[in-house]
Amino acid sequence: MQNPSKKYQPFQHAPKLADRQWPARTLTHAPIWCSVDLRDGNQALAVPMNVSQKLELFQTLVKTGFKEIEVGFPSASNTEFTFNRRLIEENRAPDDVWLQVLVQAREDLIERTVESLVGAKKAIIHLYNSTSPAQRRVVFQKSKKEIIEVAVRGAQWIKDRLPRLKGTEVMLQYSPESFSATEVEFAKEISEAVMDVWQPTPQRKMILNLPDTVEVAMPNIYADQIEWMCRNIKNRDSLIISLHTHNDRCTGVAATELGMLAGADRVEGTLFGNGERTGNLDIVTVALNLFMHGIDPKLDFSNLNSLIEVYERCTGMTVPPRQPYAGELVFTAFSGSHQDAIKKGLAEQKAGKQKSWDVPYLTIDPADIGREYREVIRVNSQSGKGGVAYLLENEFGILLPKDMQREFGPIANDEVDKLGREVSGAELKQMFWREYVERHSPWQLKSFETESKNGIVKCKAKLSRDGKPVEISGEGNGPLAALVHGFSQIGIPKFEITNYSEHALGSGEAAAAIAYIQIKTSDGKSKWGAGVDTNIELASVRAVLSALNRLE
Ligand code: KIV
Ligand code: ZN
């Protein structure tokens, strides 16, 4: 890979646009969306979809809210033709949905394409030919003039056949394929030549689709190209300017967003970016990017998981775990500091303290796209106490006091580290139980009785220490004070209770309670303990013994 300048050169076709306007603009509304899943996406599949898979994906796209769907290349194969016929004859497209079909500038193909559309309610006929210097030189060996003639002939053949589509509302679309690698002056010239044939008006517009067929430059260059076209092409108000980006440099989304700022009205793309090579534009990402800025994307991704399920089944593709918004790990935090921040952010949000969504590390509320909060935090060796506490609370209703979280967090982390993998909430609970609730040695409780007179509580506790029976009795202003007093009578190091909390585990009369107690010895050692019992008094006695056992 030495000296790339010998083999590669900087991008050659950036338009001169010193007074570009797009950088100062912001997006305020959704574009017209067109899904090309069933055409561009489909043609890039190792095993293209069969008719029933295409039908299922079509229904799903309609349900998601797409009003323009490129359904295929009907002149390319019988499957494609049949699919289009079934959509029309079985009346599968709602009245407000346009069926878009792609065709090259060849008369036989145009003939078959028009035939495939007879009876449709709304149809977009999409004509394309390639315009970049490399395509003109390598593929077609034609001059600019000849390339324009190809487009104009194609446009005329389509126009001649429009009377055959009586009863169908037809919209015409032209794409100078490889637009982003084409000189803008030539892209304008060829597009205007097609406009001269189709004669669009502000009332009957045509779509001019300007594809980034192969991403060859940075997204700001594409934006300049789009703004240049919007400003220089004739009769702009008779055109719907459309974007169609691919993702070769991994900036398909950025190019589309900047292209929208630059004046485009319409966006073509696919679900999750399926498409040739590195894919088409991922419409889900652009739509949800708008959504996270409070702009209605006019597409419904409120059940993204079910969309992923249909997409994966129909296309045989998989959505990667880190795919924006859709990936399995997108709403999962592994690092402890992230988990802590998310936990605090979600709590603040729940308390209604913020008017709009502003949770660290979560760009949107996962619930808005059908994800569950429970998926937000998982625990591995990189996690901190926040994640541990979050899982115990959310999955089991165990509310560890803050200070106890600081004690248990590192203990859990050590165990997770030894396991060398992520752990579930159930495993964390087991660790907690082993560490605190099931600490029955050396001290074990046999029975605990109290009686109260004139505000003084007396207790009698039957215990065992290393299996040998020990009885203690004491008194104080409550059962725990009496127990501590009892212990002080039998010569073990003095301790006091420095922290106490308890709550029910679950609901109903038979529900157990859990008590958390922190003790501190006279020589400054402090430990937490936890006890569970259906009787809250016994739960706290058990918690004291748990803390004492953990001291030893
Ligand atoms: O990527 C592309 O240029 C295309 C055209 C047919 C619009 O898919
Ligand atoms: Zn494409």
Image (cartoon, rainbow, N blue to C red):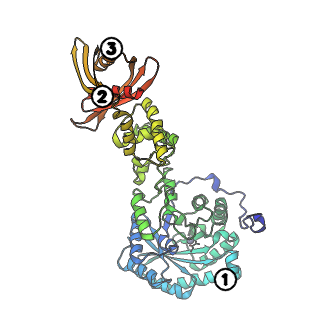
Q: Position of residue 214 (x, y in %)?
A: 62, 69
Does residue 415 appear left or right of residue 442 in this picture? right
For residue 345, the mark is none
Kindly identify which residue carries mark 1. Answer: 140
- Looking at the image, the residue that sits furthest to the bottom is 108
- Residue in the picture at 57% in, 75% down: 174
Determine whether, in the image, residue 253 is placed left or right of residue 51.
Answer: right
Residue in the image at 44% along x and 29% along y: 403
Whether label 2 lies within 8 Å of ligand 2 gets the answer no
**Amino acid tagged 2:** Gly
Q: Does residue 112 appear in the picture of this structure?
A: yes
Determine the secondary structure under disc 3: loop
- Residue at position x 41%, y 26% in the image: 552
* Residue shown at 42% from the left, 70% from the top: 314
Question: Under tag 1, what secondary structure?
Answer: helix
Reading the image, the residue beneath label 3 is 489
Judge whether 54 appears above or below 63 on screen. Answer: below
Residue closer to the observer: 552 or 513 = 552
Q: Is residue 305 left or right of residue 240?
A: left
Q: Nearer the viewer, residue 426 or 204?
A: 426
Q: Where, by quadrant of the figure, is residue 302 drawn?
A: bottom left
Give the residue type at disc 1.
Phe
Which quadrant, please, contains the N terminus?
A: bottom right
Label whose residue precedes the other's in the sequence (2 or 1) = 1
- Residue 162: x and y in percent read 49, 83
Residue that numbered label 2 is attached to: 467
Above or below, 74 against 230 in this view is below
Badge 2 density bin: few <14, some 14–19, many ≥20, Cα 10 Å: few
